[in-house]
Amino acid sequence: MLKHSFYKLAIRTTPLMLLLLLLSVHPAKAQSVSAYLGFGTATDSSSNVFADNLGGGFFGSPRMAGLFGQFGGDFMWKPHLGFGAEYTWRVRQGSYQDLNYRPEFYDFNAVWRPLTRSARIVPELQGGIGGATLKIYLPPTCISIGGCQSSGQIASSSHFQLHGSAGLRLYATPHIFIRPQIDIHYVVGFSSGQNPEFGSNWVPVYTIAVGYTFGGQ
């Protein structure tokens, strides 16, 4: 039980700690340091599993969709090579078998850029490992006088994942960029077991981010 709690705490805090470390690197000592925030969507098919969780009848598992947020950072210690981290999450809870759900993904990556910052359009490839968490919540409780109140988390599952992405950094100024990107998450166990959570282990994510680069030209 203690080991499981420590693992869940590490999943929640590691992405933020690494991003803070990336942003604390002084640009004079690094080729460049970047931070970005974006939004988009993630997709996965339904597992077609039906369950009666609240006694109101059987409801099927959904396909993954909705608005997702993504923030991240990277540190380029060489003109073409560096490392980075990303955190991606569903902005609002979605409906899942008469309950609510929110998937989250985090990953740590090697970063490769074939062109230097002297170019205004910079291709970028990333690859690494990380984790994914599916959190389950009770649906909001609504009363006629007080309105609706969100309910707390009742369950979660954690998975190992492989990550890869391809994107373009479009520099509007020497430091501000817009970055459309496609991420692919291979989440081990998403579609296996007696009650698979989704229909596939493959989860593509499509985002557009705005970011800022410190140092390096």
Image (spheres, helix red, strand yellow):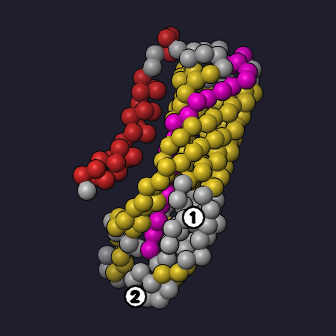
Instruction: Name the spot of residue 182 as percent of width and height, x first.
Output: 68, 45
**In the rendered picture of this protein, how many numbered marks are placed on residues?**
2
Identify which residue is drawn at 70% across, 18% down: 116
Instruction: Name the spot of residue 130 as percent of width and height, x first.
Output: 50, 43
Instruction: Name the spot of residue 64 as percent of width and height, x first.
Output: 59, 64
Identify which residue is drawn at 39% across, 39% down: 14
Mark 2 vs 1, N-terminal side: 2
* Residue 103 sits inside the magenta stretch: yes
Identify which residue is drawn at 73% across, 23% down: 114
215 or 143, which lies in front? 215
Q: Is residue 132 found left or right of 170 in the rendered image?
A: left
Q: Which amino acid, by three-letter code, is at mark 2?
A: Gly
Circle 2/circle 1 CB separation < 8 Å: no
Residue under label 1, please give it.
Answer: 191
Identify which residue is drawn at 43% across, 55% down: 158
In magenta, the rendered stretch is 99-118
Q: Which mark is residue 148?
A: none
